[in-house]
Image (cartoon, helix red, strand yellow):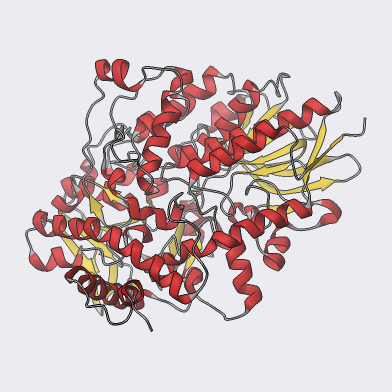
Amino acid sequence: MTGPTEAANGAGTAPSAEDVKLLELSHKYTTEAAKRFRSDGLSQFVRLKEAGSGRFRALAEDPWADHAALNAKEAVKDGAKHKFLILGAGYGGLLYAVRLLEAGLASGPHDILLVDAAGGFGGTWWWNRYPGLHCDVESYSYMPLLEETGYMPKSKYAPGPELLEHAQRVASQWNLQDKALFRSNVKSTTWDDGAQLWNVEVSEGRGPGEPSRELNLQAQYVLIASGVLSNPQVPKIPGLETFAGPLFHTARWDYNATGGGPDDAALTALEGKRVGILGTGATAIQVVPKLAKYAKELYVFQRTPSAVSWRGQRPTDPDEWRSKIANKKGWQRERMLNLDSYVTDAAEEGQENLVADGWTELPAFSAVIGSPRHGDVEPTPEKIAQHVARLHKIDLPHSEQVRARTESIVKDRETAEKLKAWYPTWCKRPTFSDEYLQAFNQPNVHLVDTDGKGVDSATSAGLVVAGKEYPLDMLVLSTGYVTPSIGGGSPAARTGISIYGRGGKSLDDKWQNHGAATLHGMCTNGFPNLFFTAVSQSSHAANNVFTLDVGIEHIANIIAQAEARTGPSGAVVEVSSEAEEAWSLQIMQGAAWFAGVVSCTPGYITSEGEAMRQSGDPIEMAKQARGANFRRGLAAFLKLLQEYRADGSLRGIEVSSRAA
């Protein structure tokens, strides 16, 4: 097989020292990835709420909901009809509501209803309250609607409580508190061709010991805003449910077991305890230093290390905020675009780096989010190899720097070697910390590296790795979430909701039989008045709120244009099959750009390696290509959407008036 440097240089050209280094690195990456491939792929995990063990299902319950207060509120009536039903009340759901209100599309008291399984606003920031929690993108770019609310984050990277508080601030400023149905799971949503409405089956929880309320609601529009970090999972480790000590997932932190609280980092109940944490991803990077401070012994169980770069946390300077950051109209969108230019390898020479953090040192991250540079990649083995070689070349300085940083910080040589990330930057969510690596210099912190194999089994007393049992008093599961690309990226599969369109057609069946089919990744033929924040056939940024706002802004504009064309009864909005096929073809033509994923170790981005399995079946390969993203990056995608909207014709979208 032709190596990346061989393809880039051509036969007969003497390799440079850099070429030799890249070839050696490619072999190392391949070897490390091979250790981690498993035949069971995604099935090695189970969603907490779907686990066969009652103990695991209980871990998915909401520990933060104030059931008495929620039960005292006026209940949403069975059979109620709403213009907009928004599935999710995190930052995405809130952005939907705000953009609809700004567009004048929702003025009545029952026009908007946000439905969420959580006990309040906030999405991932409601559920996640673990010690050390911060956003990993700078708060000035990440926290939505800062310009509209006038809020100044307290630090460059806002902590979890502040992020949750901001969700509540947005809800309060736009009077959304009484427009939400919490503790509720949407089971199905079905289009009624006669009524031209969605029938939505919802199960509303009422707290421990209380029967659920089963509701049938109606909506003119259903807008899916379920986040990408919404379904915590646990690995199927034999005997794990028999562990005798406290056991919980980071997405549902148990402060009764650890001591402290979301606003109190003193985990005093860990004193004298042997604590294990399973997983070393982006969450564990933040949690481990806090556990290390209080536990008698901390055992960190690692399958694959994270690449950990510098963080540079600092308080916000009010003078700098007023004079240099929030100093003009449109400042936050400009800042989002500026950050995005660095991670899409599109920064112009001499431009000001407004964010200037570790993210802006990652041009190779464009391998998974696209870039406006370099053109489409011709889908031939030679051209793909040249493209991947270029990605490895621009990634080399940073990946080497991160490994050198690990070696310079961690004093024990063997531990340092095991903490080095041997995969390209784009293969896992990059992490940033000035505390994580340093924690391994503490005598009470022990790295248990499984050499890519994972934990063998569990007992009532601890975890077993390579035949050795590690006794534990408490176990923290930092084992992540179900990948959003499950089911080929189907909005139904990733949310766990059954969605039936015209004639009872299943959205999951459409995705499975034909692959992704959308216009701009946000709507699909056969499912009128259904919109979703995209996973496939759209564009993404390292800053997820930027991704959400670009998509939601576009959806609100489409609905506004459609409603302006119809009478007071409202609009039925549906993309044509021709338009979604044309867009799918455009996506497929750029799909080879993302070939760098093939060199990745199994994980969240690769659906635990399933994304790299090539069946050789041309139909399946075509489906996979249809599920790719817009290859030129979010800034170019935004420009395309703006041009589409400015045209005013809603090309490819059929609009009709609802029957009176």
Q: Position of residue 250 (x, y in %)?
A: 37, 49
Residue name at image x 58 percent, y 48 percent: 534
The quarter of the rendered structure image containing the N terminus is bottom left
Residue sitting nearer the eye, 15 or 628: 15
Residue name at image x 63 percent, y 52 percent: 491
* Horizontal arrangement in the rendering, residue 302 relative to residue 124 (left or right): left
Residue sitting nearer the eye, 383 or 71: 383
Q: Position of residue 292 (x, y in %)?
A: 18, 50
Q: Is residue 594 above or below residue 201?
A: below
Residue sitting nearer the eye, 592 or 273: 592
Q: Is residue 346 above or below residue 597?
A: above
Residue name at image x 59 percent, y 72 percent: 621
* Horizontal arrangement in the rendering, residue 15 relative to residue 371 (left or right): left
* Horizontal arrangement in the rendering, residue 557 relative to residue 165 (left or right): right
User: Can the viewer see residue 600?
Assistant: no
Quadrant of the rendered image containing residue 182: top right
The quarter of the rendered structure image containing the C terminus is top right
Quadrant of the rendered image containing residue 235: bottom left
Residue sitting nearer the eye, 623 or 635: 635
Q: Is residue 188 above or below residue 458?
A: above
Q: Is residue 522 above or below residue 74?
A: below
Q: Position of residue 341 (x, y in %)?
A: 39, 42
* Horizontal arrangement in the rendering, residue 245 relative to residue 504 (left or right): left
Q: Position of residue 612 (x, y in %)?
A: 48, 72
